[in-house]
Image (cartoon, rainbow, N blue to C red):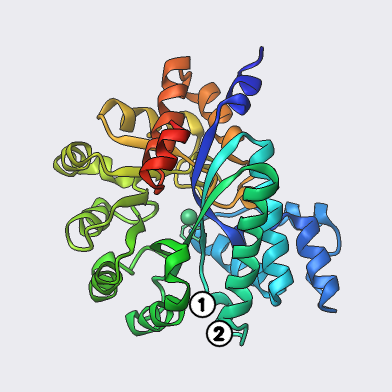
Amino acid sequence: QTVEAFIRGLPKADLHMHIEGSIEPQLMLDLAHRHGMRLRWDTAEALRSAYAFPNLKSFLDLYFEGCKVLQTEQDFYDVTRAYLRRAHADGVVRAEMFIGPQSFTERGVPMESLMGGVLQAMDDARRDQGTSSGLMISVHRHRTEADAMAVLDQIMPWAGRIIGIGMGGAEVGNPPSNFAGFFQAARDRGFRITVHAGEEGPASYVREALELLRVDRIDHGNACLDDLDLVRELAARRTPLTVCPLSNLRLQVVTDLAQHPLKAMMAHGLHVTVNSDDPPYFDGYVTENLVACQSALDLSVPEIVRLVRNGLEAAWVTREERQILL
Ligand code: HPA
Ligand code: ZN
């Protein structure tokens, strides 16, 4: 049995992925065609070859451009259903998915279309393939806190179907502290919270997320290793870190997967999980992330099992569902 077959066969969670970052190139072209739009690329191969990024910002430019093909309820259904199919084939039994409504509502897409399509796809994936999924609403840190507050108000009709609130976008220069009021409001409304921090930004952003925003999880979190007091705090609280190794490689957060801090994070007792982020853009779903790390970092079978189990343990599910997953 190969390492890949072993990893693919393990029931896994994907706790850090972005729906709008999961559009495979062919679907992007199909959706553009559906709306009579012309993209800068006319084949899937050409589009895929554009996925080369010097940093987070250059990725985000293309990612936001790609968002323009998502317009109707059907589009949101199709992209979400396609991701959940791939995830199921990848052995993912629990997917926690971000969507950032600001990319769509700013162009006049009604929140109803976005939520309707995504939630229907989640229900169908549960019914047809048994996949458990949860939806997280992500706000943009490069926009204002008032903008984020408006999103919070707009999503309240669906509050019962939203498992948490997150924040992504251009990190450096946009610290979590800028959104302290927003995340307080989100917690007051009963939402769990998770924030992208320490991907390109410093350890101090991870500390702000933990101590000021009082997050339940950290997305990425790599930079925490620069502050050992913070590492001890994260380990003591068992705050899950949703690490995305192939994303880090493709966005040049690390120069080489052999240099990835994953194993060091585990050695410090951190609750590390491995996730896909934006699979087509970074060339890998959860299995490919684990396989690449296994080979670059020489992970043992117990280490792989630990990472996978950490993911299932960190999932935001009910007590009943946790018993089924674990
Ligand atoms: N970082 C910040 N914003 C994002 C990311 C990421 O890795 N993926 C999608 N939006
Ligand atoms: Zn992300």
Q: Secondary structure at mark 2?
A: loop
Please tell me the numbered disc located at residue 72: none
Question: What amino acid does circle 2 point to?
Answer: Glu
Question: What amino acid does circle 1 point to?
Answer: Gln
Q: Which residue is mark 1?
A: 102
Quarter residue 243 falls in:
top left
Q: Secondary structure at mark 1?
A: helix
Q: Which residue: 80% across, 71% down?
A: 32
* Residue 41 visible in rendering: no
Q: Are marks 1 and 2 in contact (CB under 8 Å)?
A: yes
Inter-mark Cα distance, 1 to 2: 6 Å
Q: Which residue: 76% across, 56% down?
A: 25
Q: Position of residue 78 (x, y in %)?
A: 73, 62
Q: Between 259 and 77, which is closer to the camera in this rendering?
A: 77
Against 139, residue 273 (above or below) is above
Q: Quadrant of the C terminus?
A: top left
Left or right: residue 16 compared with residue 25: left
Q: Position of residue 170 (x, y in %)?
A: 43, 66
Q: Between 308 and 298, which is closer to the camera in this rendering?
A: 308
Q: Between 300 and 236, which is closer to the camera in this rendering?
A: 236
Q: Position of residue 63 (x, y in %)?
A: 61, 64
Left or right: residue 251 compared with residue 188: right
Q: Position of residue 73 (x, y in %)?
A: 69, 74
Q: Residues within 10 Å of mark 2 (few under 14, many from 20)?
A: few
Q: Which residue is mark 2?
A: 106
Left or right: residue 88 compared with residue 211: right
Quarter residue 88 falls in:
top right
Against 117, residue 146 (above or below) is below
Residue sitting at the far bottom: 108
Q: Which residue: 24% across, 39% down?
A: 238
